[in-house]
Amino acid sequence: MAQSNEEGLQRSLSKRHVQLIAIGGAIGVGLFLASGDAIATAGPSLLLSYLLGGGFTYFIMRALGEIAVEYPTSGSFSAYAHKFISPCAGFIVGWTFWLLWVVSCMVQVTAIGIYCNFWWPELPRWIPALIALMSVTASNLLSVKSFGEIAFWSSIIKVMTIVLVIITGTIILFLGLGSGTHTPGISNLFKYGFFANGFKGIFLALTMVTFAFIGVEFIGVTAGETKNPEKTIPSVINRVLLITISLYVGTLFIIMCMYPWPEIAQGGGVGRSPFVLTFSGLGIKQAAAIINFVIITASLSTSNSGMFSNGRMLYNLSLQKQAPKFLSKVNSNKIPSNAVIASFIFCLIGVVLNAVVPAGVFMMLVSITTFLGLFIWGAIIVVQIYSRRGKSADDVSKLKYPMLFYPYSNYIVLAALMLIAIMLAVKNETRTTFIVGPIWLILLYCTYKFFIKEKKT
């Protein structure tokens, strides 16, 4: 029988569930579709961008892990900001994380519409986007254990697909298979130049790398419904980042060896997956179709994890009296059903955008997601710094999963996040996010100060 936590939710998620939910959140559109834009920005040096981005992402997860092991709760970042900084900070972080994954779900279902155009070019994107959104919402209204199984197996499909791509690509490289006009080989990494925009390209690509890694923080959100979080969370953090980085770097290495990266960059932007483009270009049409189908399941998996986090964040905000009371209601399966349905309603905006402005909606949503993700990651680092305040050396020695190289690693990561934010401002297609993002944060601050009453202690 599943254990209930102090919030009324059930601790039904095992280590394998949490691990695959985090991988499911992190591996999706960022790899399968948006990597075309990243390749155009950095060329093969994108591999260095992923290694660099994966490094500081690991420290962010270590900071989160230190707190999550000590205080496992479904509210994660919001609850920690509330506890260690202020109720206002918890309000801003919680609602920003919720918006992050509302917008991210819009990105995923938009991508599904794009993928479906591979078979049905005339099909309006909003139709498959709506079907996908309804499916993941239904999945999130099941029991936590059932959701965990769905998330687990859908993530397994995408991971196995990536592994098969790497294996197939390796065979093609060494045996010279494929009937296309381009010759696969490691020389493709250097034949057209390793750097698309010099060393600057490595840093410019970090915006897309950040977008790709957003989702690993689900580990913190699942803490409140995880069996034995003290052992599960550290194990999952150590494995998930290693697996995710390896899959990203390994897959992109193979793809850029199999097919000239300038053509991937030209044809694999927001309209077509570099994976499908590569196999089609090599004349392996059946493989392209199969991969396109699996990519759809990958986006469903990511949006499924996103809807899970949306429901838990709204639920926790409601418990803290920072969201309407009806959002704290749980159904017979111990699921915050009202919070999930409310998130679904807001995600419908993405369906509407696909009906009204299908051409420009994808990159607009990606840039907003990246800005919000940077804010949340920065908040994790700052909250961990605050959580150490007042702790004696003896208290720190008793931490079960302490942050590595504290506090120097914290400051280095914050500097890296600021650098990526600057890169967002430099690129024309992402610059508008610096209007939307700050307006959202100012709106939240004013809402809290004028409409949310702090409890006097």
Image (cartoon, rainbow, N blue to C red):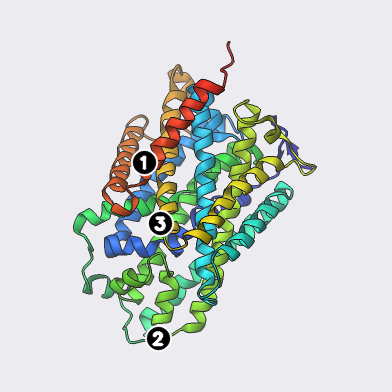
Residue sitting at x 44%, y 24%: 386
Give the structural element (helix, strand or loop) at label 1.
helix
* Nearest to N terminus: mark 2 or mark 3: 2
Residue sitting at x 31%, y 83%: 183
Residue 301 position, x and y percent, is 58, 58
| Quarter-of-image position of residue 376 | top left
Give the structural element (helix, strand or loop) at label 2.
loop
Residue sitting at x 56%, y 57%: 351
Numbered disc in front, either 1 or 2? 1
Of the residues shown, which amino acid type is indicated by label 1? Ile
Residue under pointer 3: 363
- Viewer-proximal residue among 396 and 293: 293
Residue 433 position, x and y percent, is 37, 45
Give the structural element (helix, strand or loop) at label 3.
helix
Of the residues shown, which amino acid type is indicated by label 2? Leu
Residue under pointer 1: 435
Q: CA distance from mark 1 to mark 2?
A: 49 Å
Q: Is residue 96 left or right of residue 20?
A: left
- Quarter of the picture containing the C terminus is top right
Residue under pointer 2: 177
- Viewer-proximal residue among 175 and 413: 413
Q: CA distance from mark 1 to mark 3?
A: 15 Å
Numbered disc in front, either 2 or 3? 3
- Viewer-proximal residue among 281 and 137: 137
* Nearest to N terminus: mark 1 or mark 3: 3
Residue 7 position, x and y percent, is 69, 31
Numbered disc in front, either 1 or 3? 1
The answer to whether residue 15 is seen in the rendering is no
